[in-house]
Amino acid sequence: MAKRAKSIEQLISQLNKLPGIGSKTAQRLAYHVIDMKDEEVRELSNAMLEAKQNIHKCDRCQNFTDEDVCYICRDNTRDTSTICVVEYPKDVEALERSNCYHGLYHVLHGTISPSRAIHADELSIGSLIKRLETEDIKEIIVATNPTTEGDTTALYISRLIEPLGIKVSRIGYGLPVGGDLEYYDEITISTALENRRTLK
């Protein structure tokens, strides 16, 4: 097999670390970057650095934002009595595209997964409980993905919230088991929200 230049190998290796990027895609992207004009590469690099340096978690819902409080939490037309709990910021975008949910969100930034040594205290569950103690919330919709980790996290949250007397529901199984929320179309997400069930 022909040996690549060290710089190309390093670029492919770094791109291969990104989620969903296999070795062939990493190779294709690396050669594309090399073919780009210097100014285009600088713009790409600067955009990545700027996003990394300026984006942080919203003080209220933990979604990514470049302000203290994100645009959804600042929107006074939203239903402030409902919080939809999701795994990642990309799930917020998926639900917003469906245009069927108009409440607030809380982003966990992961799921409980003993096999990967991810425990509840590493997620933003603590800040969710603090919100429930200070905000007038009537329902929590747990929209973690229909996976073993998602279900485990949903049950854990349900048991924590139960003493507070707040209704906790789980997004409906219009979603295929084992799937990721971000990949579903608006109709599937809308159906899953409408068919949510109370967690006990």
Image (spheres, grey):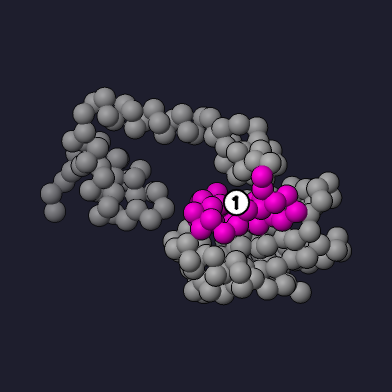
Residue 42 falls in image quadrant: top left
Residue 122 visible, this angle: no
Q: Nearer the viewer, residue 91 or 31?
A: 91
- 20 with respect to 173 (left or right): left
- 187 with respect to 131 (left or right): left
Mark 1: give few (<14), some (14-19) or many (20+) Cα within 10 Å.
some
Residue 55: percent from the left, percent from the top? Answer: 54, 34
- 161 with respect to 148 (left or right): right
Quarter of the image for the C terminus: give it.
bottom right
- Disc 1 element: loop
On whether residue 87 falls in the magenta region, the answer is yes
Q: Nearer the viewer, residue 63 or 45?
A: 63
Q: The residue under label 1 is which amino acid type?
A: His
Residue 92: percent from the left, percent from the top? Answer: 56, 52
Query: Residue at 65% across / 41% down in the picture?
Result: 75
- 18 with respect to 92 (left or right): left
* Range drawn in magenta: 77-105
Residue 152: percent from the left, percent from the top? Answer: 66, 68
- Residue bearing the label numbered 1: 109
Query: Residue at 68% across / 41% down in the picture?
Result: 76
On whether residue 106 falls in the magenta region, the answer is no
In the displayed structure, 119 sits above or below 131; it is: below
Residue 93: percent from the left, percent from the top? Answer: 51, 51
Query: Residue at 20% across / 42% down in the picture?
Result: 31
Residue 143 visible, this angle: yes
